[in-house]
């Protein structure tokens, strides 16, 4: 095996012993255990090194937190949980505010949120068997068959059910629903909803309750992934800076702008780039450069060959010259040759075509640049999507087989999962470096030029390592799926793939760091230009560039 | 005809509207649709609408009383909370609606709105502006319109 090729001379603090890479030490093992998708902590690799101060919450986690806060308030204020919920809703789930305000003036708060201590509508005990008219449906009911909230205004159960249902149908306002009696401020709390509402209305009500909990607190956000029900809690600091989050649904997003995860590129660049991609302007520019209307029928004709001799589509079939738009039959030796239109040249010399042609050229250059970056940006994204699918497939279908054939435990095969996760993460980073590259000043002073050189060098190195890793994970893998090989051989494969994973990770960490520092690094730029010129030979260690 | 299965509540309300009409207000259901009411409100005394007879239409939607009735002026009126189409800006017809309110309370509220225009919550920006900048002149216009369009002729 040629595993030496992939050796990487890393920082002294990591290791100086090559063997360390291949036979994972405790530290490495611990990391690997955290990698498998689906367990508690599968954020992407490059974020691990950055801040990882967020927690993924599933619905039951949120409910638990909510319930804890409700219980706390209920215990401290000696009120029902339903009443505590009303207060927490009013104070956007800020437990401290609820307690402070309550002790500062219980009376005032009760009035404000509609929690009556005593009913305002009083029914003497002996009247309980008497009939009253429900003031919604105008039917008569025994009082014992009617329902009311803290104010005591009685309505029949049917009307309550409809009233609550309409409110829940209307939306989140149902959380602060009031008594149907005109001008009565009494709140319809959770206990009353439980008493009056239909089953599916109750479920929708608790959904609103959970939503209000997440949406009224700045440290929580819903994962923007389609059909994903996870919420994310940001543990420390705020969401002011660009910050990548990766959810269990494998959706990576930026906490700040809620777009796809985009480290190391900032939110502003992402917004600019996305706007550019969505704008029709480019289609127009493309049309402008590559099509002209047929002078006879007016249909836009695309120029897709080098030749100036254009033929319109059926049924028109008009033949014309791309440059002067004159009929092709007038072109020939007399007009300066078939492939050098004199009419055009003459007009150009007279200044008639200059301006238009200049715009065309500039637009074309700009478009070519954009296409270059866009294709690579989109290409890496689709490659990342494919890798996500491949990883799922691998875990579902191949891991067991591989474990049987190669006599390896699933834990011993984690290096494969780790390789895939590395690929997925790197594809994402690489994708965004193309948006970064698009906005990097192209020409200008020496500093700008050397920055671009440095960027392209780092990007190129990272990319070529990623390609090797992706190839090895995708293709070489299959050799081991079908035949049993010697332990030594399989160990070599493991060593190669783990080594490649580590090397690629380091290259990408360098790239990310360099871009986040605005490419403010001159010391290593000279170094890179020498390395660039020679390819590592077999058996030679690739000297990765590390930043001090 | 939409009169079969008319809820008991609507029947009772209608009976009461006819037997004990509120002063200055009359409301009678249309013959072929018991959910559609022809309404007349007399312009309240000491208001620019005094002496006028204002025609309105009131419709009880399927969801009534869980949803508010739909009411609209048919007679042209110069009022900051009523627009060209006769639509009325009144909280109980929108978010402050409660199923325990009635046709009667709605019509009484509209009558009260004629006595106390509220240019701070306008439906017709121009009329509200007129009301705020030159109330006396606006009131004159309202009186003029009452004479022109609501004289009961
Ligand atoms: Zn009822
Ligand atoms: Zn009440
Ligand atoms: Zn998610
Ligand atoms: Zn962002
Ligand atoms: Zn043609
Ligand atoms: Zn020509
Ligand atoms: Zn030509």
Image (spheres, coloured by chain):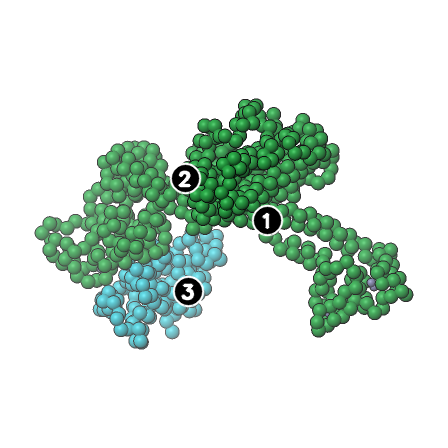
Point out the frontmost of discs 2 and 1: 2
State how far apart marks 2 and 1 are (Cα). 30 Å
Question: Is A432 situated above or below A6?
Answer: below
Are there few (<14), some (14-19), or many (20+) residues within 10 Å of tag 2?
few
Task: Tell me, yes or no, whether the two marked residues, 2 and 1, touch with CB atoms within 8 Å.
Answer: no
Viewer-nearest residue: A527 or A72: A527
Q: Which residue is mark 2?
A: A39
Q: Is residue A288 above or below residue A269?
A: below
Mark 1 highlights which residue? A378
Q: Position of residue A405 (x, y in %)?
A: 46, 43
For disc 1, the chain is A
Residue A167 lies in quadrant:
bottom left
Quadrant placement of the C terminus of chain B: bottom left
Colour for chain B in the figure: cyan
What percent of the width, then of the height, locates residue A63? Answer: 33, 42
Q: Chain of mark 3?
A: B
Looking at the rendered structure, which numbered label has been put on residue B86?
3
Q: Chain letter for mark 2, please.
A: A
Q: Residue drawn 27% across and 64% down?
A: B23
**Which color is chain A depicted in?**
green
Would residue A198 be found to the left or right of residue A292 on screen? left
Q: Secondary structure at mark 2?
A: loop
For image coordinates 60% across by 32% down, the residue present is: A4
Number of disc labels: 3
Identify the residue shown where x is 30% and y is 60%. B66
């Amino acid at each position: 095996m040629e595993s030496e090729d992939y050796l990487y001379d890393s920082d002294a603090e990591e290791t100086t012993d090559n063997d360390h890479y291949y036979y994972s030490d405790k530290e490495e093992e611990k990391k690997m255990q955290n990698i498998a998708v689906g367990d508690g902590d599968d954020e992407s690799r490059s974020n691990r090194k950055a801040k990882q101060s967020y927690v993924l919450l599933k619905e039951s986690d949120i409910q638990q937190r909510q319930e804890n806060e409700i219980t706390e308030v209920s215990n401290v204020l000696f009120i029902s949980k339903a009443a505590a919920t009303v207060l927490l809703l009013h104070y956007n789930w800020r437990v401290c505010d609820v307690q402070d305000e309550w002790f500062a003036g219980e009376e005032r708060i009760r009035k404000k949120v509609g929690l009556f201590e005593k009913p305002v509508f009083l029914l003497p005990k002996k009247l309980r068997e008497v009939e009253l008219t429900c003031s919604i449906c105008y039917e008569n009911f025994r009082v014992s068959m009617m329902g009311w909230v803290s104010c005591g205004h009685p309505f029949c159960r049917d009307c309550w059910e409809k009233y609550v249902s309409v409110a829940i149908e209307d939306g989140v306002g149902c959380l602060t629903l009031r008594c149907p009696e005109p001008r009565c401020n009494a709140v319809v709390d959770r206990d009353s909803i439980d008493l009056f509402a239909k089953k599916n209305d109750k479920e929708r009500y608790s959904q609103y309750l959970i939503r209000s909990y997440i949406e009224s607190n700045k440290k929580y956000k819903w994962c923007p992934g389609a059909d994903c029900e996870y919420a994310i809690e940001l543990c420390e600091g705020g969401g002011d800076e660009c910050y990548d989050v990766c959810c269990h649904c494998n959706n990576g997003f930026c906490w700040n702008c809620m777009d796809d995860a985009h480290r190391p590129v900032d939110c502003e660049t992402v917004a600019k780039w996305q706007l550019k991609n969505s704008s029709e302007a480019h289609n127009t520019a493309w049309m402008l450069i590559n099509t002209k209307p047929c002078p006879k029928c007016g249909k836009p004709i695309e120029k897709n060959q080098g030749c100036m001799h254009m033929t319109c589509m059926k049924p028109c079939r008009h033949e014309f010259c791309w440059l002067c738009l004159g009929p092709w039959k007038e072109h020939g030796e007399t007009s300066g040759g078939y492939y050098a239109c004199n009419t055009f040249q003459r007009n150009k010399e007279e200044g008639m075509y200059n301006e238009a042609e200049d715009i065309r050229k500039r637009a074309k250059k700009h478009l070519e640049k954009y296409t270059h970056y866009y294709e690579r940006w989109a290409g890496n994204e689709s490659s990342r999507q494919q890798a996500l699918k491949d990883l799922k497939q691998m875990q579902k279908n191949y891991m067991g087989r591989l474990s049987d054939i190669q006599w390896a435990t699933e834990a011993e095969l984690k290096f494969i999962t780790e390789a895939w996760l590395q690929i997925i993460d790197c594809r994402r980073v690489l994708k965004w470096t193309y948006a970064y590259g698009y906005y990097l000043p192209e020409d200008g002073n020496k500093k700008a030029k050397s920055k671009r050189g440095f960027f392209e060098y780092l990007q190129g190195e990272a990319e070529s390592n990623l390609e090797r890793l992706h190839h090895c994970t995708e293709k070489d893998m299959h050799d081991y799926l079908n035949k049993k090989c010697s332990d030594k051989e399989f160990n070599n494969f493991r060593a190669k793939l783990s080594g490649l994973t580590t090397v690629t990770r380091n290259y990408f960490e360098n790239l990310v760091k360099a871009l986040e520092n605005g490419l403010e690094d001159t010391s290593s730029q000279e170094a890179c230009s020498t390395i660039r010129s020679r390819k590592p030979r077999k058996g030679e260690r690739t000297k990765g560039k590390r930043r001090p | 005809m939409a009169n079969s299965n008319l809820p008991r509540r609507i029947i009772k309300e209608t009976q009461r509207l006819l037997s004990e009409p509120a002063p200055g207000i009359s409301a009678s259901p249309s013959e072929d649709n018991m959910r559609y009411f022809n309404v007349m409100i007399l312009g309240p005394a000491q208001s620019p609408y005094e002496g006028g007879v204002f025609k309105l239409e009131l419709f009880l939607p399927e969801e009534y009383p869980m949803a508010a009735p739909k009411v609209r002026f048919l007679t042209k009126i110069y009022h900051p909370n009523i627009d060209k189409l006769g639509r009325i800006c009144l909280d109980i017809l929108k978010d402050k609606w409660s199923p325990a309110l009635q046709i009667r309370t709605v019509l009484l509220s509209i009558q009260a709105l004629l006595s106390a225009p509220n240019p701070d919550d306008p439906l017709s920006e121009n009329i509200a502006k007129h009301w705020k900048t030159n109330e006396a002149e606006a009131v004159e216009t309202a009186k003029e319109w009452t004479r022109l369009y609501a004289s009961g002729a």
